[in-house]
Image (tube, rainbow, N blue to C red):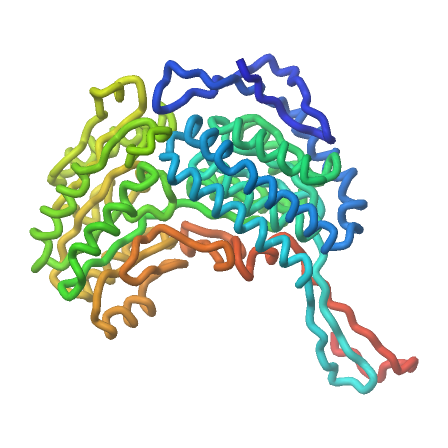
Amino acid sequence: MTIYRSYIAGKWIESTSGKRVPNINPADTRDIIGETEQATREETRQAIEAAYAAFGDWKRTPAPARGRILMRAVRLLEDNKEELAQLLTREEGKTISEARGEVTRGTNVVEYCAGETRRNSGETLASELPANFAYTIRQPHGVVGLITPWNFPIAIPLWKIAPALAAGNTIVFKPATNTPSTAVRLMEIFTEAGVPPGVMNLVLGSGSEAGDVIADHPAVRAISFTGSTEVGLKLYEQIARRGIPFQAEMGGKNPVVILEDCDIDLAVEHTASGAFGSTGQRCTAGSRAIVASSIADEFVEKIVKRAQSYRLGPGSAESTDIGPSVDEHQLNTVLKYIAYGQEDGAKLLCGGHRASGDGLENGYFVDPTVFDNVTPDMRIAREEIFGPVLGVFRVDSFDEAIRLANDTEYGLSSSIFSNDYNNVTRFVEEIESGMTHINSPTTGGEAHIPFGGIKASGIGPREQGSTSLDFYSELKVVYVDATGKKRESNIY
C-alpha cells in the first residue's frame, strides 16, 4: 500500500503522529489507494522553519532564473499529463476528460507565471522636486502558506505555487486531507524541475493541526486559502491578529438568469453543464436558474430531460458524464440539502436520491437533481450545496431577476442568457459578482485572466492573470534625491 508523507527541507519524512488516513476511491470504496501520514504540529513548524531558512537564497535568485525552473515544471506537467489526470480521477472522482482539462489549466497558469518573471517591473515616477525621481519595485513576503481544497487538487495548488515561487517566496503547502496523491506528485515534479530544498515544503495534515500552526506561526508572512466561506472567514479572523496579507477564494451560489429572448436550447445545455459538471463540486457551479415565467415550463421540461440523460459512473470510464461526490461526508451533505428542499416546499422534479445499480452502490453517487418553484427563503436557495443540485426560480420581470440574482451573501460568478443588448449590458453593470458570463455557463476561466469574487466569495487580490503576482509581493517605493542638498520642506 502506498504511504503518503510530508516533504520538508528536501526530504520525505516519516511522521511521529502515528495517525494515518485512508485515501479512498470515491467511485469504488473497496479501492483503497493508499494511506496518508498526518503531520504533527511540530513537523509543520519544521516545514515553516525550513522555508524560512531557504528564503534568503531564493529571494536573491534572479527572477528569470526562477522562471526557468517554472518552465521545466511546465514541461514535466505536459509530459506527465495523462498520469496526473488518471491519478486525479481515481482519488477525487471527476471524469477523466475533466481531469485532463484541469491538468491543462494548471499547466497554463505555471507557464504564464514563468513568463511574468521577465516582466517583474515597477514604475518610474516624476517628482515635484527638481533633480528628484521615485520608482517602485516588488519584493517577496517571505514564507507563504498555501491551503488548498480537494475539488481541484492539481489546478488550484498550481495557481498558488507558481506565482508564489515566481515572486521569490518560499512555500508551505497544505493540501486537502482527501487528495494526497496529487499533492505528492506535484511536489515530485517541482523538485525534479529544480526547486531547491526548503523552498517548497509539503505538509499533509488536518486543518485543526497543520493549518492552525501555519496560521499562527510568526515566520509565515502571507496565506492564500481556497475553500468554504465558513472556514475562510474563521481563518481570516485568526490571522487578522497578526496583520499579515490574506487571500481567500471561497464559496458561491451562482445565478443563471434566463430571459424570454434567449436561445432556450443553448441556455438549457449550458445551465446543465454548469450545475452538474464536476458533480456540482465547483465554487463556480450555476446552482440557481432564474427563469422568466413565460418560458419557465419549457425550460423546466428540457432541463429535466437533460439531467436524466447524464451517465453516472467511475470517472475513469470515457463514457461517464458525472462522477461521484468526493467522499461520504460530501455525499451526506448533498442528500441533507435535498431533504431540506423537500421540507421547505420546493418541487422535486428529478433525482433526489443516492444512485444505485450498475455498480454505483459501491460509490458516492447522487443522481442529478432539479427543484422547481424554489423561493429565496429556502435553504437550497441560500446555502452552497456543492453537489449536482439545481434550483429553478420563476420571475415575472428582469428587475425581479436582478434582485433575486443579487439576493445572496456570495458574489463569485454569474451568467445571463439573452439576445437583448440592453438587458445584457444592464446585467453586466448591476450583477454583484466578480465574474460574469454572457450566453455561457457560470463556470470556466483562462490562465491569463483574473479569477475571483466579491462579498463572501473572496478576500484580497484576484488570483491568476495580470493580478496573479499582486498578492505574493510587497510594493516598495524608492525616492532618489540627486541634488546633494538639504531639502527645504518635507510634508510627510
Q: Nearer the viewer, residue 148 or 376?
A: 148
- Return the x and y of residue 145 as percentages of the image width and height: 62, 40
- Return the x and y of residue 285 as percentages of the image width and height: 33, 46
Residue projecting furthest to the bottom: 130
* Quadrant occupied by the C terminus: bottom right
Whether residue 195 is situated above or below residue 120 in the rendered picture: above
Residue at position x 27%, y 41% from top? 276
Whether residue 376 is situated above or below residue 230 in the rendered picture: below
Residue at position x 68%, y 35% from top? 191
Q: Nearer the viewer, residue 444 or 59?
A: 444
Q: Visible in this render: residue 255?
A: yes
Q: Nearer the viewer, residue 26 or 399?
A: 26
Whether residue 209 is situated above or below residue 418 in the rendered picture: above
Determine whether, in the image, residue 443 is placed left or right of residue 149. Answer: left
Residue at position x 17%, y 61% from top? 263
- Return the x and y of residue 232 as percentages of the image width and height: 48, 42
